[in-house]
Image: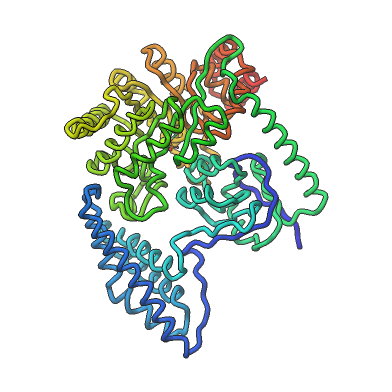
Amino acid sequence: MTSFALHGIGVSGGIAIGRAQLVSHATLEVAHYRISAAQVDAEIARFNAAVGAVRDELTSLHGDLAGEDMPGEFGAFLDVHWMILNDPTLADVPRRIIADQRCNAEWALTQQMQVLVEQFEQIEDPYLRERKADVVQVVERVLKRLMGSHQTLAPAAESHTILVAHDLSPADIIQFKQHNYGAFLTDLGGVTSHTAIVARSLNVPAVVATHNARQLIRDGEMLIVDGANNVVLVNPDRAVLAEYRLKQSERELERQKLKRLRTKRACTLDGVDVELHANIELPSDVDQAIENGAAGVGLFRSEFLFLNREGLPSEDEQFESYRAVAVGMKGRPVTIRTFDLGADKTKEGLAGLARVAPNPALGLRAIRFCLAEPRLFNTQLRAILRASHYGNVRILVPMLASVSEINASLAAIEHAKETLREQGVPFNDSIEVGGMIEIPAAVLALESFLSRLDFLSIGTNDLIQYTLAVDRGDDAVSHLYDPLHPAVIRLLAMAIGGAAKAKVPIAVCGEMAGEVTLTRLLLGMGLTHFSMHPAHLLEVKQRVLTSDAAASRVLVDRLRRADQPAKIAGLLDKLNA
Ligand code: PEP
Ligand code: MG
């Protein structure tokens, strides 16, 4: 067996040693095999059964439409899928292919999908052309049935198994929380894509953008994933394995030592108190937040309640999830971000998102989507407000760019309150409402935010993406994604300084907050609220405990005026010395 190394982007540190498990994605890697003449009827029956099952699924979703919570476009979207599923080009032609070519149903279906997609690509009308995405989605639904599972990921055979995939969606990764993978690798992905962010929260090593790991690695091969050094070693020899096992145990020892800081107050050497909060994706993440001494939840990415499930979560289901977090955090602040759906967090069934937007990161995402779907938004707001009766809950609105969006969000919250009041349902009437600063416009028009909102939270992942016009999920431009770009540093300093002057609390909840080499940079800008994945809390606390905020401020003032990358890097080194 030949040993070789693959390079990528380590999105999550640590070392994992284990055997590879390759995952297939429905349309990407459909098997092709021949069947005998005697098997043709059974294969066609299998195809018919899968189509029938998807038909039932769409019918039952239609039935749910009668419910209160369905967004307006949902029905139209279902109708389109229903028509595609029942069109002879998709319902009949694959049967003929199975019989004529004596091939398996999955292969026949994807062959026909290819033909249809090519036909759609020829259409001039841009709206109709985009319907090809619906064709692909319908085919994926049928493929999932044919493959006998709704789940994309199979459970890991053993806890050290390393998952190797071409690409994984954030929804796929969230399933890792139930399975016990030791690490994961993908061919695609950017450093702050949501896929990477969720991977980081699992506290397992991960390397993305390996380009061809999925092709080069075989099932069962021994791998070492070194997330900190952006490298994957395939079939390492004994000496290399032994060296990495040693490194692994040293790291584990360090982690154990850090645990002693769990209950220690986070305070700089010169007496500045710092609040370290946790970012969570699911209610079950509260345990990890508490274990790592989080002073609160600074960001609950509630949209993950939407993913990996059929239909939409009802008000009661959402309420139970929010209440569980509020109660689990035992009176500590719990900041629930309203749904940030869109861009790389999409879901079949939500028409506004399912449409292949020309530029999804700039499209109907986050608060824009919620304001376009008032019923869905109202359901979530009612659920959050109801949960506010059971703990210290705050509302955080993502991706705000303008005063009209702030006003519309506040009006929607007021409306949700009114409906609860009418029904005599208890909630915290003075619940705090905050806004995320993720778009440069929000920093440049900070006054409008400061005068209308109770607190702010800077989403650096998006702020960097939108400031530098670099897609956070695209590895082709990940070298341009730079948290230390002078423009980013200046925007951060403006937002933190502006909020401090106005005495409005401000936090950073993007990945920069959990990056220990940037802790002093943020402290030096005057930041005292950080929110990050629980796995990073203790390391950042250790850095806070050994930092002098006033000394950092002097260096950061110099750093803010620098524009040469080498000079900035040099000052950062000094800051971290
Ligand atoms: C951010 O953009 O920095 C952020 C915290 O939100 P998300 O990563 O979920 O977009
Ligand atoms: Mg964001």
Q: Nearer the viewer, residue 210 or 24?
A: 24
For the point 36% across and 61% down, which residue is it? 137
Establish if 544 lies above or below 459: above
Residue that appears at 59% across and 9% down: 270
| Direction from residue 490 to residue 5 in the image, left or right | right
Residue 486, can we see it? no
Q: What percent of the width, then of the height, locates residue 212?
A: 60, 57
Where is ligand 2, by quadrant?
Answer: top left
Residue 269 in sight from this viewpoint? yes
Quarter of the image where one finds residue 547: top right
Q: Residue 318, position in %: x, y?
A: 34, 42
- Up the image or down, 428 lies above or below 177; here it is above
Q: Nearer the viewer, residue 159 or 530?
A: 159
- Which of the 4 image quarters holds residue 459? top left
Give left or right: position of 118 versus 266.
Answer: left
Percent x, y for residue 149? Answer: 46, 64
Question: Residue reaching furthest bottom?
Answer: 38
> What residue is at 34 percent from the left and 26 percent from the top?
434
With 545 as the anchor, is 41 left or right in this view?
A: left
Q: Position of residue 337 (x, y in %)?
A: 37, 34
Query: For the view shown, which residue lies furthest in the left direction?
Result: 422
* In this picture, residue 347 sits left or right of residue 529: left
Residue 320 occupies which quadrant of the picture? top left
Residue 175 to residue 271: above or below = below
Count of marks, rendered view: 0
Q: Quadrant of the C terminus?
A: top right
* Of the pair 437 and 377, the residue shown nearer to us: 377
- Name which residue lies at 26% across and 27% down: 403
Of 382 and 229, nearer the camera is 382
